[in-house]
Amino acid sequence: MRILLAEDDAMLGDGLRAGLRQQGFQVDWVRDGLAAEREISTGDYQAAVLDLGLPQKDGLDVLQALRSKKIATPVLVLTARDTVPDRIKGLDLGADDYVLKPVDLFELGARLRSLVRRAHGQVQDLLTCGQLQMNLAARQVLLENQPVALSTREFDLLHALMLAQSRVLSREQLEQQLYSWGHEVESNAVEVHIHHLRKKLRADLIQTVRGIGYTLRYNQAT
Amino acid sequence: MVLLPRLKSLQARLLALLLLLVTVVWLGAAGFIWVDASDELGELLDGHLAQSAALLIVQQTGQGIGASDKGGEDTDEVADAPSLHKYAPRVAFQVFHEGQLTMRSANAGTAPMAQKSRGFSTVQLGDRSDWRVFAARGSEGDIQVFVGEQIDSRDSILWAVLKGVLMPLLYALPLLAVVGWLAVRDGLAPLRHLSQVLAQRQPNALEPVVLNDLPSEVEPVVHSLNALFERIQAMVAAERRFTADAAHELRTPIAAIRTQAQVALGAGSDKAQRDHALQTTLAGCDRASHLVEQLLTLSRLESSSNGAPVGRVEVASVAQRVAAELALTALAREQELALDAPAKAFIEADEMLTSVLLRNLLDNALRYSPDGARVDVSVTTDGKQVSLRVEDSGPGLSEAEMARLGERFYRVLGSDKTGSGLGWSIVRRIAVVYQARVAISRSERLGGLCVTVCWAAVPEKA
């Protein structure tokens, strides 16, 4: 899952990025409001953690600008402003969650997963596709109730495909969801991961749509 | 207003004043009329008396001649004139011929009414009433005429005139009171409206009062009121911002410590990550304790602004000591810190607080300037004032940022430095306590920020 972290405090931002990475999130970190708005607007992120007291543009203004541009990326507001009017304002402006500092890293991770899940219409932290099950919190994949060991990238790639359901995702879209900044992306990285996934799962599970991309076969035989 | 009893109601006060004024003016007018009318009336009636006396003399002279022609048989008879008018009993006359009373009115006595034989006099007659008497003699001297008139009658005429003036007042006063009451009530309507509007406001409503058609007397009241609301609103906003900023500034270091500690716990076998997280946790603790330190300094300053200690402080030596303390930090970042304090400079202040001020200024300059930057400190005096100047080659500040310096918890945005945001508040506070002026500008020499603090100089020994 690729997350944008907008936090101006160096120590806290560094900690949050490290903590969320430990939980398997791909995290990009920006330190001001304008950058946050620009990055979230790209649509490359499945969720964003937004501090309110950001330089250049306040978090609430960023949120308002995003929502007025009809950008629906789930936003978790992480702030020290704890008064009820502040929370109401944040939620009314389009925040999907409002969390007070200091926050437990695992709680933050769970809330982010929940945001992403709800954004895709899921009610449980469990994705299923035929005989394939994915537990997001445990980062575990079961095929016919047997656990399958996947690397981080493979897991994220499968996750993206499962969230997309029957939509076809292009190679570029998959790359954007897999890699945070500073990672060299090899031109055939996605193909390599798909190849591994097919080997570990079943060859016919991921279908290639020539010239367009990949999709999961939903109507696979049970 | 002094004459009036202290009436609470403006309306009652105005009305009482109005009625009092009307009554006084009216009574004054009546008095004036009384004096004027009694003068005129006296002259008119005196004229009538004289006229009557002249008529009597002329008539008597003619009659006397006629009587002597007839043979004088009735000379002993005294003729009584008939009473012809309701005022007749108040008018009397006597005619003497060669000392003998020859004719008189019914109400006149036999003795001469006045001692004087010519002119006006005022006498008391029979029933003790006052009479105005005019005495005249015929040209040959043998006829003496007295014409008198009761003075009461003059008074009753005057009273009649006065009644005409005073009676309307009696009727007009209650009417005036009612009309005046209504008029004053109407005039005070805007004030009543204002008080209603104010009474209906929520206690925490601070938006300006807007009233249409304000009379010019009430306008300044509403203006000052709105100005007051504005000031309070600004204060409340500042307090609110302070609370929000304080929440942010106090929670963020704690959040950072907690997060880094958790990262260290979760690092597992990744030693580099764990060490980094633990180092950052320690730095976070230092930062939190620095923040607490600064907050305590500020709150001590704010609570003891009146009782701040005062003594003789030598700024150059304080600057030297503070610069020495911070030199290590500067060296670690390869920053160049230079002090230029050629002469001793004395001010009236507290040594500890002066060094706190200096440390904050220097700390800011070093903290917000890049590695390898240069910071110059100079202390100069011209005998009248002592100037301390801290200049740096850092990025400087925009006008807007300079204006916001000194707001508690304000930190220049975009800097990833971990200041408390309280340094400037402390500097300003100390400057206020010791009447020092603080000026911020762009450094001409180094290109960064230039802060100048000026105190009044004092001699070395009192």
Image (cartoon, rainbow, N blue to C red):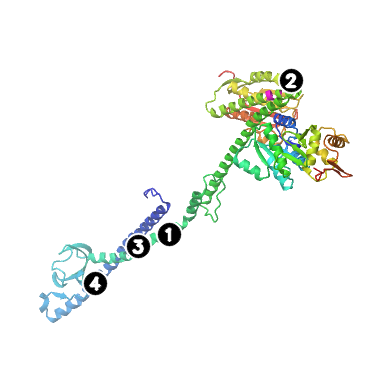
Horizontal side of B66 relative to A167 (left or right) equals left
Along the viewing direction, whichever of A152 and B112 lies nearer the viewer: A152
Helix, strand or loop at label 3? It is helix
Query: Disc 3 marks which residue?
Result: B169
Choose the circle earlier in sequence order: 2 or 1.
1
Whether the residues at callouts 2 and 3 have beta carbons within 8 Å, the answer is no
| Residue B89 appears in the figure | yes
Q: Neighbour class for label 4 at 10 Å: few (<14), some, many (≥20)?
A: some
Which residue type does callout 4 highlight? Ser
Residue B113, image x and y in percent?
A: 17, 66
Query: Disc 1 marks which residue?
Result: B182
Choose the circle earlier in sequence order: 1 or 3.
3
The quadrant of the image that shows the C terminus of chain B is top right
Q: Which mark is residue B52?
A: 4
Choose the circle earlier in sequence order: 1 or 4.
4
Which residue type does callout 1 highlight? Leu
Q: Are marks 3 and 4 on the same chain?
A: yes
Placement of B284 over or under A129, stated as above or below: above
Along the viewing direction, whichever of B276 and A139 lies nearer the viewer: A139
What is the magenta range? B279-283
Query: Disc 2 marks which residue?
Result: B332
Q: Quadrant of residue B310?
A: top right
Q: Neighbour class for label 2 at 10 Å: few (<14), some, many (≥20)?
A: few
Q: Which mark is residue A214?
A: none
Please report the residue visible at 64 percent of the width from the left and 43 percent of the height from the top: A89
Tell me the CA gap for discs 3 and 4.
39 Å
Tell me the CA gap for discs 1 and 3.
19 Å
Would you say the magenta stretch is mainly helix, strand or loop? helix
Q: Quadrant of residue B377?
A: top right
